Amino acid sequence: MRLLVTGGAGFIGSNFVHQTVRERPDVRVTVLDALTYAGDEASLAPVAEQITFVRGDVADAELVDRLVADADVVVHFAAESHNDNSLSEPWPFVQTNVIGTYTLLEAVRRHGTRYHHISTDEVYGDLELDDPAKFTPETPYNPSSPYSSTKAASDLLVRAWVRSFGVQATISNCSNNYGPYQHVEKFIPRQITNVVDGIRPKLYGTGENVRDWIHVEDHNSAVWAILERGRTGETYLIGADGEENNKAVVELILELTGQPRDAYDLVSDRPGHDMRYAIDSTKLRTELGWTPRYGSFRDGLAATIEWYRANEAWWRPQKDATEAKYAQLGR
Ligand code: NAD
Ligand code: TDX
């Protein structure tokens, strides 16, 4: 199989490439990545000899056409991915997430290529804390931020290209990922690296917001299950029943790093901050037989803390600029 992975130098994409090289020697991987502030070729260093890396933009129609012509399957991870950035500067989100996806869809339509679209549970908006409901594939789209609205727009383009043009596509909407190689702007790595630097972790608002955490390896094994056994035209929700509120996550990071559990600061809230996400992954589990392997969030988080401690050279170059951006926002 010739596999084109967009966004393969980012957090989830690089873990996907590592997993694929490790477990599927018959797959020939090409990565297309623009190496924005969020992409880092160092994340692919352990597999650099086994893959082809192309630096370029998913909205570059000529380049994308050439790469898609040479692929059997495309998995599209590339995106602007951080909600806080989307609130300060929405345009790159429209350009990459919407125009970039459109560009790929036109190429897979021309070449008849199998396409998998990586998306997020945030397209469904949010749930109340006391609501027993979870997101299902039938939940109406109701995105809150520029980030989630551009992801929703890209999902709808995929659905239209399936229905109108018969493109062989699947979509997955996953909950919050954690694990190695995640940019230090994101919640968990930001707090781990803050503790390493002697900075108190920062909780937005009251810290009551709930996220449904899944280890990145489990997200990626689900993507492979969909590539191998998913029905084209279908949407699969990926989640591992990992609901935790932000305060509990920070307290656990503090405990696992030997700090007092209350050694954090409450800072100003994110505008439009989604309250709770929760995924019902029944369809993925029953139709495709997928189960997550990382049972314990505590163990997965402890391993992630160890990874950041052992790989300071990877995250250090991003840390000061990231914290300077947050300082401007007062967070
Ligand atoms: P990330 O920000 O870590 O990585 C994004 C990658 O895309 C980077 O390597 C970047 O250089 C690349 N990129 C950005 N713009 C590009 C462009 N125009 N052309 C080519 N490459 C470009 O993001 P992530 O957290 O790994 O997320 C990957 C995908 O998974 C995204 O589509 C995101 O919406 C989705 N997702 C993420 C999560 C999560 O918790 N992080 C959860 C569900 C879904
Ligand atoms: O310093 C912080 N303090 C804090 O309390 C940061 C950076 C975040 N938060 C809160 C905001 C959220 O409630 O933690 C939660 C997680 O924040 P992020 O890591 O920014 O993730 P989120 O906004 O939930 O979106 C993530 O999951 C869905 C990814 O960034 C998206 O790409 C994915 O689609």
Image (spheres, grey):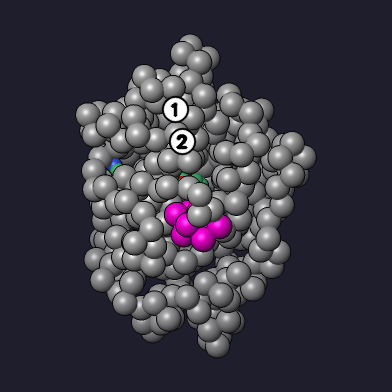
Name above or below for residue 158 compared with residue 244.
above
Split into 4 quadrants, where in the image is the C terminus?
bottom left
Q: Earlier in the sequence, mark 2 or mark 1?
A: 2
Q: Is residue 168 visible?
A: yes
Q: Amino acid at mark 2?
A: Val
Residue 204 - label: none
| Whole-percent x, y for residue 65 in the image | 29, 29
Residue appearing at x 46%, y 35% in the figure: 73
Residues shaded magenta: 15-23
Residue sitting at the far front: 26
Q: Which secondary structure dominates the residues rendered in magenta? A: helix
- In the image, 132 versus 104, the foreground residue is 104
Q: Residues within 10 Å of mark 2 (few under 14, many from 20)?
A: many
**CA separation, marks 2 and 1?**
6 Å
Q: Is residue 105 visible?
A: no
- The residue under label 2 is 73
| Whole-percent x, y for residue 139 in the image | 64, 30
Q: In which image quadrant can residue 200 be found? A: bottom left
- The residue under label 1 is 113
Residue appearing at x 38%, y 51% in the figure: 8
| Whole-percent x, y for residue 135 in the image | 66, 38
| Whole-percent x, y for residue 82 in the image | 38, 50
Q: Residues within 10 Å of mark 1 (few under 14, many from 20)?
A: many
Q: Provide the secondary structure element on which disc 2 rests.
A: strand
Q: In which image quadrant can residue 217 be found? A: bottom right
Q: Is residue 82 magenta?
A: no
Q: Are marks 2 and 1 in contact (CB under 8 Å)?
A: yes
Name above or below for residue 284 compared with residue 309.
above
Asked whether, in this view, residue 224 is left or right of residue 318, the answer is: right
Residue appearing at x 52%, y 42% in the figure: 120
Residue appearing at x 71%, y 52% in the figure: 291
